Image (tube, grey):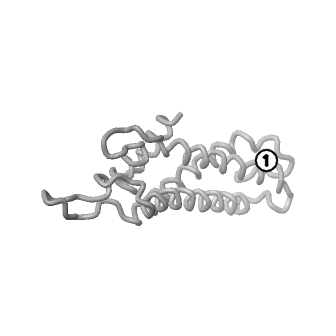
Amino acid sequence: MGNVLGTIYCFFNSFFGVNLEAHLWGFDGVNYSNSIAFNAIGIMAILTSLFMVITYYYIINHPRFYRWWSWLIVLIINGTVNLFIGYSWTINDLNNGVIADSLMFLRDVNGDIVSELIYSSDCWGFGISNFILATIFFVIFSFILKWWSSNCKYSPF
């Protein structure tokens, strides 16, 4: 599943860059021997989206909340939670020095840093990618699971 999730995330690598992508694929500076972070982040996005869909259709499930805008609010909450999951995962790796030096910096022949290759904005970009994917998962789960809801089965349409 990790290769599938990683491949899906890589459609959005223009948001977060190839160096952060390589880190999330498990590149340790020499080879790809670390665990694939796309697995954990993607599974969290899927489970969070599933939880939010079940919450909306079967726990909240109130006639007052069957409108499309109620569904949209839950969708945005789900996306926002996943945005911060993706951002916090990558910013923690960035701040704690977990990312390989060869991915972080471009160095000259003397070993001096010429330029930085991964920025905090790349972490926000990955968070946005996670937001988009979680939104897609939420919509898919909604169309699969909404039919058995007693009050919200016609939401969002």
Q: Is residue 121 left or right of residue 49?
A: left
Query: To which residue does mark 1 refer?
Result: 153
User: 65 or 83, which is in the foreground?
Assistant: 83
The image position of residue 119, as x and y in percent, is 36, 64
Tag 1: amino acid: Lys
Residue at 50%, 36% in the rendered image? 2
Locate residue 82: give its quadrant: bottom right
Return the x and y of residue 156 as percentages of the image width and height: 70, 53
Neighbour class for label 1 at 10 Å: few (<14), some, many (≥20)? Answer: some
**Residue shown at 70%/51% (left/top)?**
157
Residue 75 x %, y %: 65, 57
Element at badge 1? loop
Residue in the image at 41% along x and 66% along y: 120
Q: Relative to residue 101, is residue 52 drawn left or right?
A: right
Q: Position of residue 127 (x, y in %)?
A: 50, 58
Left or right side of 134 for 109:
left
Furthest residue in direction left, as rendered: 109
Residue at the image position 46 percent from the left and 63 percent from the top: 124
Q: Using residue 9 as the reference point, say whether residue 117 is left or right of it.
A: left
Count of numbered circles in the view: 1
